Amino acid sequence: MLTYKAAYKYLDEGVHAEVVDFPGVITFGKTLEEARKLLSSALVDMAETYLMYGDPLPRPDPTCSASDADVEEPIHLLLTAASRVTLVPEVASV
């Protein structure tokens, strides 16, 4: 499990959310609860994209902070391994 830092900023239209130590993980929700759910999903999507392209995940940086955030809290990325098996039909020799 990797623990990053989530930051939330209340705006008139809703809540801006970002993971301050994982570049590109940002979203927006109407409420804090919606922003949390969307941010969790965005973090998973971005981590999967990094891994799909063979890029290392950013290291969590506990010193990162968003000075204009109204709320900062940990957000956890749980890595799971899975294997995919594809069966290729045997070609009969003639």
Image (tube, rainbow, N blue to C red):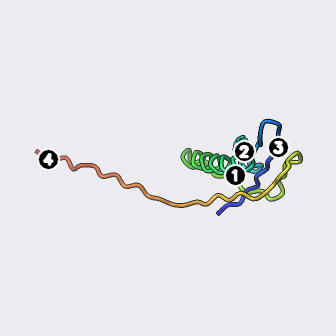
Q: Position of residue 43 (x, y in %)?
A: 65, 49
Cβ–Cβ under 8 Å for marks 2 and 1: yes
Q: CA distance from mark 3 to mark 4?
A: 67 Å
Circle 3 residue: 10
Q: Position of residue 70 (x, y in %)?
A: 86, 49
Residue depicted at 71% across the width and 60% down the height = 3
Closer to the eye: label 1 or 3:
3
Q: CA distance from mark 3 to mark 2?
A: 20 Å
Cβ–Cβ under 8 Å for marks 3 and 4: no
What label sits on residue 93 in the rendered view?
4
Q: CA distance from mark 4 to mark 1?
A: 49 Å
Q: Residues within 10 Å of mark 3 (few under 14, many from 20)?
A: some
What label sits on residue 23 in the rendered view?
2
Cβ–Cβ under 8 Å for marks 3 and 2: no
**Mark positioned earlier in the residue sequence (3 or 2):** 3
Quarter of the figure with residue 59: bottom right
Instruction: Determine the secondary structure under disc 4.
Output: loop
